[in-house]
């Protein structure tokens, strides 16, 4: 059986592109006892992957070694099994990597129920949903009636954060990069307001939305939107740090906020990484399932075709052309 995978050839200094990968075509050997062979259907493209290919060893995961298959989350179908842990036809998700096939040992990937469309495991019932829920509910500790601001608001995490916020009785404002995205947030997702960070006066917009200040802020991008939110926090407010995508390719932030506000306003700053909280996934997905059933949670996927397109498609996360959770379709279900 033929496989194709993308292996990291070189570490980028800026944007991750095709030239950083080798395309490896290989004949798979027969499946070993105790393993299962998985055909990958979708792989997830996540901003964090840019950090995983940097040489830095002081992050929450070690860098992807040069020559290894690119690390990524994904979901697939068991094609053949020589272990009781998996049976042919099971849907399995976890760290599949950028490959068409992989052989796994028991425990390496999780079997997931076939009760929702497979795509849902890439969005709401995947990293994005877990991150949005954990970050807002557990880290942000919101209370009904409070005001919430979220940046990267039209992205896969941000759009869920705002909707969960609305379901919890918060007033929500989102900051995103196009008028079309802002309109989607308000008209389709029920955000109370949205600002375009490229064209709107963020300071003014936030002041008008929350004249007494924001109770809670969820940060996904860094730079100017972060500075505007910090300047508009209420005393004793909470700021949740999920991501800083504006500097992942080595850029300097376009604005550095005045951190003395932390003291003046007695703010709480808290960062988190979801790899520390895998144990919460079942509880979180049960809560998200209830919100979905109640019609309070919508999500959209941006699906690109073919594993070979993954490096180029990754750039969509950084120029903002992804509309929803960005995934690559590797094979047909
Ligand atoms: N802490 C964790 O465990 C965890 C887990 C998952 C994700 N995250 C973080 O959450 C954030 C969102 O991830 P996601 O998967 O949901 O991606 P996403 O929001 O679906 O896609 C990325 C979006 O970021 C925006 N963006 C890109 N460059 C920007 C810049 N320079 N300034 C402002 N906005 C910019 C773009 O939207 P616009 O059109 O609005 O610019 C783009 O669509 C990322 O920072 C990611 O690292 C953290």
Image: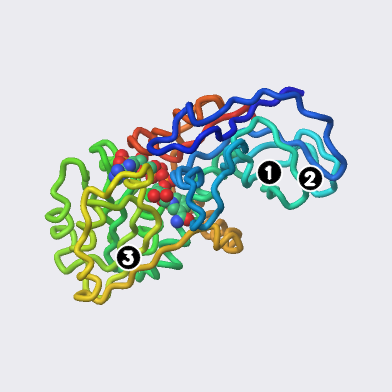
Q: Can you tell which mark lies on residue 86?
A: 2
- Residue at the (32%, 63%) spot, across then down: 170
Q: Position of residue 57 (x, y in %)?
A: 51, 54
The answer to the question of whether label 2 and label 1 lie on touching residues, with beta carbons closer than 8 A, is: yes
The Cα atoms of the two marked residues, 3 and 2, are separated by: 42 Å
Of the residues tagged 3 and 2, which is closer to the observer?
A: 3
Going from the N terminus, do you reach mark 1 or mark 3 first? Answer: 1
219 vs 284, left or right, is: left
Choose between 84 and 211: the one closer to the eye: 84
Q: Can you tell which mark lies on residue 239?
A: 3
Choose between 112 and 46: the one closer to the eye: 46
- State the residue position of label 1: 92
Badge 3 element: strand
Q: Name the image quarter holding the C terminus.
A: top right
Of the residues tagged 1 and 3, which is closer to the observer?
A: 3
Going from the N terminus, do you reach mark 3 or mark 2 first? Answer: 2
Q: Name the image quarter holding the N terminus.
A: top right
Q: Position of residue 273 (x, y in %)?
A: 48, 59
Query: Residue 226 sits in which quadrant?
Result: bottom left
In the rendered image, the vertical position of residue 310 relative to residue 192, given as above or below: above
Q: Residues within 10 Å of mark 2 (few under 14, many from 20)?
A: many
Under 8 Å from ligand 1: the CB of mark 1? no
The Cα atoms of the two marked residues, 1 and 3, are separated by: 35 Å
In the rendered image, the vertical position of residue 234 relative to residue 205, given as above or below: below
Badge 1 element: strand
In the rendered image, the vertical position of residue 198 relative to residue 18, given as above or below: below
Residue 172, visible in the rendered structure? yes
- Residue at the (62%, 38%) spot, across then down: 68
The answer to the question of whether label 1 and label 3 lie on touching residues, with beta carbons closer than 8 A, is: no
């Amino acid at each position: 059986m033929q496989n194709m995978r993308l292996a990291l050839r070189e570490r980028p200094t800026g944007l991750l592109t095709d030239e950083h990968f080798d395309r490896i075509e290989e004949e798979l050997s027969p499946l070993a006892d105790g393993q299962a062979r998985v055909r990958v259907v979708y792989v997830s493209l996540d901003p964090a992957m840019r950090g995983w290919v940097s040489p830095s060893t002081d992050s929450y995961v070690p860098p992807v070694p040069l020559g290894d298959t690119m690390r990524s989350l994904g979901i697939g179908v068991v094609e053949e099994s020589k272990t009781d842990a998996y049976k042919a036809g099971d849907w399995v998700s976890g760290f599949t990597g950028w490959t068409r096939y992989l052989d796994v040992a028991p425990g390496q990937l999780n079997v997931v129920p076939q009760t929702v469309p497979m795509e849902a495991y890439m969005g709401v019932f995947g990293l994005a949903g877990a991150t949005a829920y954990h970050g807002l509910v557990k880290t942000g500790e919101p209370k009904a009636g409070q005001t919430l601001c979220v940046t990267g608001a039209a992205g896969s995490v941000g759009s869920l954060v705002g909707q969960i916020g609305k379901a919890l009785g918060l007033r929500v404002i989102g900051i995103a990069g196009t008028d079309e995205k802002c309109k989607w947030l308000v008209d389709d997702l029920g955000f109370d307001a949205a600002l375009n960070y490229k064209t709107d006066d963020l300071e003014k917009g936030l002041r008008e939305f929350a004249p007494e200040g924001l109770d809670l802020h969820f940060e996904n991008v860094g730079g100017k939107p972060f500075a505007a939110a910090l300047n508009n926090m209420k005393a004793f407010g909470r700021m949740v740090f999920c991501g800083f995508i504006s500097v992942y390719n080595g850029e300097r932030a376009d604005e550095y906020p005045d951190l003395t506000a932390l003291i003046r306003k007695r703010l709480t700053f808290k960062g988190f990484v979801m790899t520390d909280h895998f144990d919460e996934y079942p509880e979180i997905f049960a809560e998200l399932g209830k919100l979905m059933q109640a019609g309070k949670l919508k999500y959209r996927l941006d699906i690109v075709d073919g594993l070979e397109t993954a490096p180029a498609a990754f750039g969509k996360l950084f120029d903002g052309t992804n509309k929803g959770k960005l995934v690559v379709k590797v094979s047909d279900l």
